[in-house]
Structure formats: C-alpha cells, structure tokens
Image (cartoon, rainbow, N blue to C red):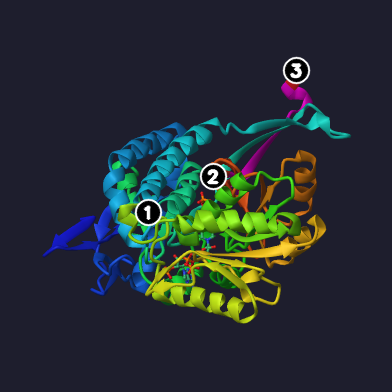
Amino acid sequence: MFQNTIQGETVYGNLLNGEWVESASGHLLEIRSPVDGSLVGKIQAMTKEEVTEAIQDTKLHGKTWAEWPIHERAEIFYRAADLLVERAEEIADILTMEVAKERKSALSEIVRSADLLRYTADMGKSMEGQAISGENFPGGSRRKMSFVRRVPLGTVLAISPFNYPVNLSVSKIAPALIGGNTVVLKPATQGAVSALHLADVLQSAGLPGGVLNTITGRGSEIGDYIVTQDGIDFINFTGSTEIGQHISSLARMTPLLLELGGKDAAIVLEDADLDFAANTIADGAFSYSGQRCTAVKRVLATDAVADQLVGKLKARVEQMKVGDPREGAMITPLIDEKAAESAQKLIEDALEKGAHLLTGNKREKNLVYPTLLDHVTKEMEVAWIEPFAPILPVIRVKSIEQAIEIANQSEYGLQSSVFTNDINKAFSIAEQLEVGTVQINNKTERGPDHFPFLGVKASGMGTQGIRYSIEAMTRPKAITVNLRDEDLS
Ligand code: NAP
Ligand code: G3H
C-alpha cells in the first residue's frame, strides 16, 4: 500500500514494479516538519540490495515502455495532470509542512507540475523526427536519405532536491518517460513524502509497473551506490554544486545533466524604474526564504541609485510576513537548523568586515528573519557564497563595467537580472554576462517551464526545459536508405 496509517503515523512505501513495498530492513526515516517538528510521515531507508533491485526492475521494463506509442504515453500524462489537480489541496498541505513552503506557493507548485505534464505530453507528440536528403552536402545525392528520430537512452536516475520536491521531480520524470526511458526517482529525504505522492499520482493515472520506481534513503548513505550502479544510463540531478561535482566525479561515462547552485546578481542601472526594481528584487530574493536556486542572491547597484534603491528595498523587506507557511508567511523556517547556522555565520562575517545592516539579523531556531546588508564588499563571504537563506547583500559599483566584472567573478553562472529602461544597454550587458539566462527587467526565475533552463560554470551542465529535457534524455537514431540504380528503374 502507498501509505499505511497506524496510530496517527503515516508510513510510506516505495514504488517497485507497480507495487508499494516496504524495506526488508525495517529501517524507517522520520520526516519531521521544519515548521514545528511535527511528524509528516515515515519513509523507507532502502538497503543497497533493494536499490539494485529497483534499478534492475526498471531495466526489465525498458523495452516494452520504449515500444509504447507516444500518444498512449501522453494519455497517461493527461490523466496524471488531472489527478494532480484533483489532489492539489491535499498534496499542497503535505508539501507546506514537509519543506515549510508558503501554502499558496505549495499549491502553485502542484498546479505548475500538472501544466508541465500536459505540455510534455503535447511536446512529445509533436517531436516527429526528420528526413535528411544527401543532396544538400557536396558530392551527396538524393539517392541517400537519412531518417532520424529520437530514441530513449534507457534508465534515467532522477535525483531531486528538497526545495521543489514535486516540480523538480516531475520536470525530470515526465520528459524522460515521454522520450521512452524508464526512471528511478531518488527524491531528497526532506521532500520525499511529497515526491512519493507524485509517484502515486502517476501510477494511479495508469503508468505500467516498473516504468517508474522510487528509492528513498539518505543520499549520504546510498547516494554513491546508486549513481555507480550498472544499468543507469543517464543521471539527471538537481541539488548543490558540492554534491553535483561529487556525482560527476563518480559517473565515469554515464551522461549527466546537472542543475546546481547559483549566485544570481541583479544589476540596477541609473535609468531603472526603482520602485519596480526594488519590489521585484525583494520578491525574487526573499520568496520561500531565499531557498530557490534562482533567488536573487546579490544586488549590484550603481552609486547613483544605490541610496534610493536600498531605501526602497528596506521598506519592502520590512513589510514581509515572517513565520508560519500555513498562515501566508513569505519568510518561513529554513529546511533545518544547520542551514540557519550557516546563514547566521555569513551575516556575522559581513558585519565584522564592515557591512551595514539595514534590517534583519534576527533568528529563532531555524527561522531567519529577512536580512538586508548594504556596502557589502568583495572581501565578505556573502558576496560569493550561495546562502540559500533570506539574506540579500547590496554591492555598490562605480560603473556598468564594474558591475559586469563582479557579476562574472562568481564561480556560479545560473542567471542574472538587468534593470534599466534602455533596451540597447540591457542587451549589451546581457551579452557580456556569463550565465545561462539574463532576465531584463524581471527577477531571476526558472519558468515558464518550456524555456531553456541552464547554468554555466559551477551552476550546472546541460539544459532543462521541456523540449530541451526530452532531447537531453534521448538520442538521435539515424537509418539511412541508399537507393541503387535498380531501385529506381
Ligand atoms: P543537496 O544536498 O545537494 O541534495 C540534492 C539531492 O542529492 C538529494 O536528493 C540528496 O539526498 C541527494 N544526495 C546527497 N548526497 C548524494 C550522493 N552522494 N549521491 C547522490 N545523491 C546524493 O541539495 P539540496 O539541499 O536538496 O538543495 C539545495 C541546493 O540545490 C542549492 O544549492 C540549490 O541552488 C540547488 N538547486 C539548484 C537548482 C537548479 O535548477 N540549478 C534547483 C533547485 C536547487 P538526501 O536528501 O537524502 O541527502
Ligand atoms: O530552485 C530552483 C527552482 O528551479 C526555481 O524555480 O525560479 O520558478 O522559483 P523558480
């Protein structure tokens, strides 16, 4: 059974060959809410033998699934999207407590995931392949014709992070499956309950047994084992740069897609609409307490506007509701106390080195109040380290050139924003920024989910986004017809 509630405690199984199973080890992990420590549920700590079984089982079903007509795979996704919407309130309640995400954002994560399923189904059906004539190349001929279509890679290992347990699981699973791959999902331990609900929805929508299996257990204990298992044909990972680089070092020839950390800069020029820029940047930096890969993680403001901008940022930040995600707070407890301690250290380091505290620097256990720091310099850790917490450093710059230079000095290269009313300047700056995406007059953000989403440098490898993800997890298969004279007669 997917979930079993005994004396008020819910125990979740893992999906294996269409059945929900418990680990023979009897070892369970308690998932407690970062909000109040209450029990969200218990999940299985799978043994290495069970991990191998889960992977091998998906392999067994690979050929049959790859032969399923795409339009039939798509039908399952449409049903799953409807079911996800039907169950959205229930799953949003769980997600809210499991990762302390504001209830409204939790709900929108579910609805967005349903939309992603539908769009992936549509996209899968529209990827028709190509016929390429030999005559286009010098010396070639019309008698040679290559028929190219995309075929699956095999079994995809999807590893998702805590902060979007549903959306960042489905954004791997759906493109992989529509492309004909089977999938093994290893969700973040904190986030696993929400991700298992997604797996349950997909199964209830008619996904055949063994096409999607789930693995739960601590990454620190079984992670290395999973990624080095024979039978994994592709690893699609989202998480920290540290773990992503570690996986990359173990992966040998297994192809990888990595979505990692970021230090997205918002550059604000003199001609920007400062009210708009301040509100947009503050929301981008502090929503979900800054626990978004795409959160604005530093502001580079030219001297001419810095005083005005920080005044407006401070006013906006001081209005933010702090506290319980069920009551609409934007700033909610961080995922654990360790995260709050790291955030505290970054703030202390900056203040010791002369940063000006505009608001914040207050903490109650894992709840960190939104903290705005001005006059941050390159010597401070907060100028370079990804906090994954509600901290926004403002670095004042003398010129656009200096803003670009500091933006590019980061080891990360996920996104950047440019706020200006001069579109030519915006384009020129955008061309020079070493990131996957530049947002002109907006906060940095992933969506909409069909756009290409990628990081350069330590922010990742490969490109997500519905069509891009399908392409990443499939390969071209070419069959070339060579007509002979007698074939034409
Ligand atoms: P994390 O600690 O790196 O964990 C990510 C996933 O990796 C979890 O499922 C984790 O499992 C698993 N894992 C841990 N050790 C492993 C190992 N040795 N082998 C295989 N898997 C292992 O990241 P997080 O704290 O969940 O997420 C926050 C980070 O993700 C931030 O740095 C953020 O920027 C990044 N992120 C990036 C993007 C993007 O699109 N670029 C999106 C979201 C988040 P356990 O939970 O069991 O440890
Ligand atoms: O944390 C990373 C997510 O992919 C961010 O998505 O920009 O839509 O909030 P978002």
Label 1 to label 3: alpha-carbon separation: 71 Å
Mark 3: amino acid: Ser
Mark 2: amino acid: Gly
- Mark 3 or mark 2, earlier in chain: 2
Q: Given this view, does label 3 or label 2 mark the residue nearer the observer?
A: 2
- Mark 1 or mark 3, earlier in chain: 1
Q: Where residue 459 sits in the image (x, y, percent)? A: 63, 62
Pointer 1 with pointer 3, Cβ within 8 A = no
Badge 2 crowding class, 10 Å Cα cut-off, few under 14, some 14 to 19, many 20 or more, is few
Q: Where residue 282 sits in the image (x, y, percent)? A: 54, 54
Residue 489 - label: 3
Which residue is the site of mark 1? 102
Give the residue at x 50% y 57%: 317
Question: Does the beta carbon of the residue at mark 2 sit less than 8 Å from ligand 2?
Answer: yes
Mark 1: amino acid: Glu
The reply to whether the magenta stretch includes residue 480 is yes
Give the residue at x 71% y 54%: 305
Pointer 2 with pointer 1, Cβ within 8 A = no
Badge 1 crowding class, 10 Å Cα cut-off, few under 14, some 14 to 19, many 20 or more, is many
Which residue is the site of mark 2? 447
Q: Where residue 181 sits in the image (x, y, percent)? A: 48, 48
